[in-house]
Image (tube, grey):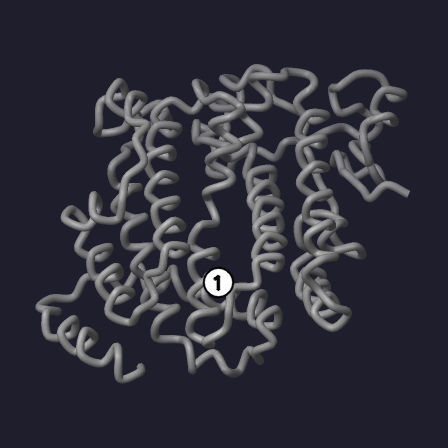
Amino acid sequence: GTAGTAEPLTAYLSQMAAPTLSFESFRRARATVEDFARSYFPLHRVPVDAFLNFMDVLYFVEASLYEADERNEASVEARPDGSIRSRESLSAQLGSTCRQTLEDCAHREPAWMAMVDLLKARGLLDSNVRRLLEDGLEYWALERRLCAAPLEASVAEAQRALSLKSFDYRVLNRLMYQLRGAPYDEPMIACMHEAELLVEIEDDLKDYGKDVARNSFNIYRVYAREYRERAAEEMAAFIAQIEERYLKFRAAAMDEGLLAAHIARNEEQSSAGPAMAPSTGRWEIPVPILDEEPLRRLSAGVARVPLLFVPPGSTCGVGSEEACAQCPSIIRNEGGSGTIARTQSS
């Protein structure tokens, strides 16, 4: 640290009387921080093997967020039928729309307070990092509400939750600029925001069957309830809007070298559709489950949630084969695999 931060940092360390993080939080943080380093360091033009130079702050912050997240998850409990009940009253949750500040949470969460104090002591808690951490508080509050009543969520609420979910990556990214002593690259940050949305959508689509069986919040469940047979078409249209923004911001943010590194990392992970990973990425949008209860009853008696199988030759549920062919860049059964895939428009 610099001379200007040495005194408050020393004062912060002298106040640390007890540990605030569990081993489980560090364990969970490890994979996230590794993925962050492999995916974001190249965009900072920093080699991944320089990770040790930044490890202390990045790892501590992510582990602190996981610790706070575990406490948030502990505030909900499962009913015997597999649904989720919050320990807060539902009416209180649904009425809780005020955005919390860091200070609102600090007195209740030792891990959160220790993280905020460290960031302040290191001079890293600027207005951008503060806003993103408060996004995290909003996301956790929204998550509690949606877990308590997953089928009462509106499309707007589901999209808001999706937009907030990757707040931890955004915090780490802003911190990385500060730790490097570099100004924020706002075009790059805007590009990665859209990429993060695509990754979160991919995760929800992959987990759709499990989340139906567990009665957990999933954005595609909201689409299925709202749009019924048109859910896959509406989801594909939503994805297409994000991909359009992503490609626009990417063109403004990345030179040839950065683009090559970014695409290579995406291909390595078969990431979130063909816009991000042109060779290996594709979208698989399940047929919407219009009556969820039979699947939940079936999954209650088996160790593994049954796969959502779409017979080869069937449509996506949005209409005829001709209608499916007209969906934007989209939904068709490929290779007799029984999967509905979204592929790049030719």
SS assignment at label 1: helix
Quadrant of residue 290 in the image? Answer: top right
The structure residue drawn at horizontal position 22% and vertical position 57%, both measured from the top left corner, is 111
Q: Where does residue 93 sit, x and y in percent of width and height?
A: 28, 25
Tell me residue 167's x, y (percent).
44, 50
Which is nearer the eye, 322 or 124?
124
**174 on left or right of 246:** left
Q: Where, by quadrant of the figure, is residue 254 drawn?
A: bottom right
Which one is nearer the viewer's eye here, 270 or 39? 39
Q: Is residue 119 left or right of residue 214?
A: left
Relative to residue 27, is residue 307 depicted above or below? Answer: above
Describe residue 237's horizontal placement relative to residue 83 as left or right: right
Please count the marks in the image. Answer: 1
Above or below, comparing residue 93 to residue 178 in the picture: above
- x, y percent for residue 274: 76, 49
Which residue is at the front of the view, 82 or 102? Answer: 102
Q: Amino acid at mark 1?
A: Asn
Residue that carries the numbered disc 1 in the rendered image: 173
**Picture residue at 72% right of the left edge, 37% below the top:** 240
